Amino acid sequence: MPVFSARSLARLETCHADLQTVCRELIRQYDFCVLEGHRGPVAQQAAFEMGKSRLQYPHSAHNKTPSLAVDIAPYPVDWNDISRFREMIIRFDALACLLRRQGRISNRFVYGGYWPSLQDWPHIEIKEK
Ligand SMILES: [Zn+2]
């Protein structure tokens, strides 16, 4: 059974409890890593300058405490294989549906991979109610 690295776990722990719950279930059946959770001002500025984020601090869901977004990637990471990212998102969403039905999480999620422009495959954020 896959497990998180210490780095992935530390990043995940900066995220909203519902994101943590789904990720902790998903790692039991699918190997992935956590690229980013919370981003402070310096990290957000760097992400903005690198083109990883279109938003400046404090407007990204990653800037909230706890972070309302998590970036994850299939492990080992291959940025050219989008089908694996797609599979990961489908698995995440299926688990999220189950966990909502079980009352273990309450939120729905938005997937950056499904954005119509500038798809952001690793990005999952809590949908505003
Ligand atoms: Zn993100």
Image: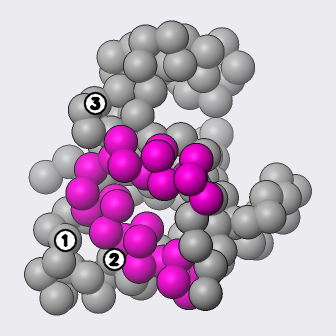
Q: Secondary structure at mark 1?
A: loop
Q: Quadrant of residue 97?
A: bottom left
- The residue that disc 2 covers is 96
Which badge, 3 or 2, comes first in the chain's sequence? Answer: 3
The residues bearing labels 3 and 2 have C-alpha atoms spaced at a distance of 21 Å
**On the picture, is 72 further left or further right than 65?**
right
Placement of 78 over or under 46, stated as above or below: below
The residue to which callout 3 is attached is 64
Q: Earlier in the sequence, mark 1 or mark 3?
A: 3
**Which region of the structure is painted magenta?**
5-30
The amino acid beneath tag 2 is Ala
Q: Nearer the viewer, residue 56 or 117?
A: 56
Question: Within 10 Å of the Cα at label 1, are there few (<14), some (14-19), or many (20+) other Cα atoms?
Answer: some
Q: Element at badge 3?
A: loop
| Tag 2 near tag 1, CB within 8 Å | yes
Measured Cα–Cα span from mark 2 to mark 1:
8 Å
> As drawn, is 51 to the left or to the right of 93?
right
